[in-house]
Image (cartoon, grey):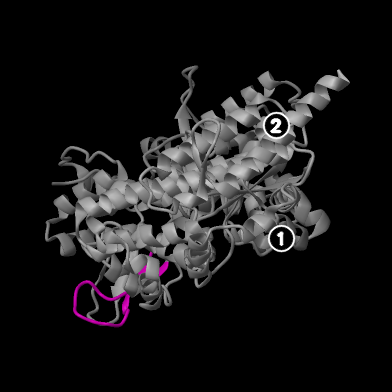
Amino acid sequence: MSLPPGFLDELRTRLSLGQVVGRKVIWDTRKSNQGKGDLWAPCPFHQEKTASFHVDDRKGFYYCFGCHAKGDAISFVRETENVDFMEAVKILAAEAGMPVPASDPRAQEKADHRSVLVDVMEQAVQFHRLQLQTGAAAEARDYLERRGLSADAQARWDIGFAPGNTGALEHLTGKGVEAKLVIEAGLAAESDRGNGLYNRFRDRIMFPIRDARGRAIGFGGRAMDPNHPAKYYNSPETTLFDKGRSLYNHGPAREAAGKGKPLIVAEGYMDVIALSEAGFGATVAPLGTAITEDQLRLLWRIAPEPIIALDGDKAGLRAAMRVIDIALPLLEAGKSLRFALMPEGMDPDDLIKTQGAGAMQKLLDQAIPMVQLLWQRETDGQVFDSPERKAALDKALREKINLIKDTSIRGHYGQAIKDLRWALFSTRKPGAARKAGTRNWNPKQEAWKREVSPVAAARASALAAGTADEGHLREAVILATMMVTPAVATEFETALEQMDCHDPLHRDVQAALLRHLDAEDPAKAINAELGSEPLEKLLAQNHVAISPAVRRAGDVDVARLCLAEEFAKLVARRGHAREIEDAVEDLSGVADEGVTWRLAQASAALDQAGRGDNEDRAEYAVGENGARMKKDEQSAFDQLLDQINFAKGHNRSKS
């Protein structure tokens, strides 16, 4: 079966070879640099213990220094899945979300035709370069010099000039190129007035646009007439040029990013050139449109966290906000955006010329994450002096966060927005308020610690060997249970992603477990990635070793019940603690029934999660709403209610 030209290029562009290969190998984390797409693993094609199999994710090729196997994503799927070429293409196309086109008997003919058009474009590039040295281009040369582009820089970027009268059409047809090919390359068009053909680019400085392989596929032209309605004009959509799936300076930027340069997304051609000439070689630009989904995927193929550097005016901010709306549904773990906003009225070119490359580097270092710009968009210039306005803000933010498909990222965005919201509506700093709340709001806190039951004291001493936190115990049991009974792990994947591990060891195991949930033996895969020490420490803890789900490893029913119970208790305990802290902070404002209701709801959830628990009953009390809480929690709860009631009475007496 023959495929249309360009289909395989597009397929390879959309796919990450690292993800395709990652399903079959375990990366050597000590040798690999995932941020640069430099990945190493034991070769899947021959038996070995060392990591001699190398994947260059940016270029899309693999090579084994042991058995010398090499190829791209298609050849890898063919070899590992034992399928033919077309079946491998279908597998990868399904993963990339691309329909496989119907058989095209003229595919080779079309491929040859594309090669002819590329040659036409290269001839046009050389023609425009020569025209820049003529007398007609004197004004264009002066303009480029004023913008700081030397003759050498102009040559490096193949900058040219399209004259106002005779142009590429006359030159190419004079060289024997068919007029039809000049039209198909996007260099000429037929007049609507019936006057024959005309050059699309006239009296413009010409910037060649090249694909990732360096082939000329289009042009961007800047008008010399300052009053021209179209200051910049790009090639139309052609067989070669799809502006929504192309980036200016794609190939050189990919190479520079592979050497450690930060990937920058600027607004226009001159910004890209200025940044690259100043040492920021990994700079690209969209082509006359807002950044598209396909361009975002291209950017993430180059670097996991591109920096969007847009002009510091209203148009630049609007463009940044549009990028946010496009990016939110596409976010994945390790793939995001940061934003470097230029000073008002300046673009990157202006900043470098007036303040130097150091000022630009400083802005890049201070680039803000996307969640902060999202918050800024929804809150800047707004006044939230009523419950209705606050509710409208909550609704707007909730709608945006719900666009995120990745559950883990959605949860982290929700928490970040909650923290920003607290900072906006609170009169105290979050850190200080939380410390004050946990340290000062209950003067008898230290006395409570001395009054706990002997059983609780024994439990506390056992915890002291670890992290002295009930949540730490539950984290450990959850992780260990998933290790020894991996058959149920995928059922609790979302809960595992959202679990906030307080122990660094647990965080490492959690992250590795999420990466290897689909492995036949997750524990073995994690051992290979992290070494044996983390799992040995996890499983050696006494409270883990005596857990029924660990002692009865492989028992799916026991594991499922254990995980459901432990996740419920962990969420309820930590949720209750957060509600108490938040309620304490809310006392700095006007106390109302909402605080009492929130605490009652948290206590009810805590009671529901704790039913059937075999903890020491002497430690528990029953609250007014029937919820079972630890005595120290109940005492804290009662004192907090006293403060709330006092505040209410005080407010009523004042009124």
Secondary element type, mark 2: helix
**Extreme residue in the right direction:** 654
The x, y position of residue 544, in whole percent, is 36, 66
Quarter-of-image position of residue 361: bottom right
Secondary element type, mark 1: helix
The residue at the point 85 percent across, 21 percent down is: 653
**Residue at label 1?**
361
The residue at the point 63 percent across, 23 percent down is: 391
The boundaries of the magenta stretch are 38-58
Which mark is on residue 379? 2
Quarter-of-image position of residue 551: bottom left
Q: Nearer the viewer, mark 1 or mark 2?
A: 2
Q: Are marks 1 and 2 in contact (CB under 8 Å)?
A: no
Would residue 528 be seen by someone viewing this image from the given angle?
Answer: yes
Q: How far apart are the alpha carbons under marks 1 and 2?
A: 28 Å
The x, y position of residue 592, in whole percent, is 70, 25
Q: Is residue 42 magenta?
A: yes
Compared across the picture, whether 532 is left or right of 227 comes to: left
Q: Pick the residue in front: 143 or 323.
A: 323
Q: Pick the residue in front: 73 or 545.
A: 545
Compared across the picture, whether 15 is left or right of 619 comes to: left
Q: Is residue 354 magenta?
A: no
Label the magenta part by its dominant secondary structure: loop
Q: Where, quadrant-wise, is the C terminus in this rendering?
A: top right
Which mark is on residue 575? none
Would residue 313 be seen by someone viewing this image from the given angle?
Answer: no
- Amino acid at pointer 2: Thr
| Local crowd size for mark 1, using a 10 Å CA cut-off: few (<14), some (14–19), many (≥20) | some
The residue at the point 42 percent across, 38 percent down is: 608
Q: Pick the residue in front: 44 or 276.
A: 44
- Amino acid at pointer 1: Gln
The x, y position of residue 129, in whole percent, is 58, 53
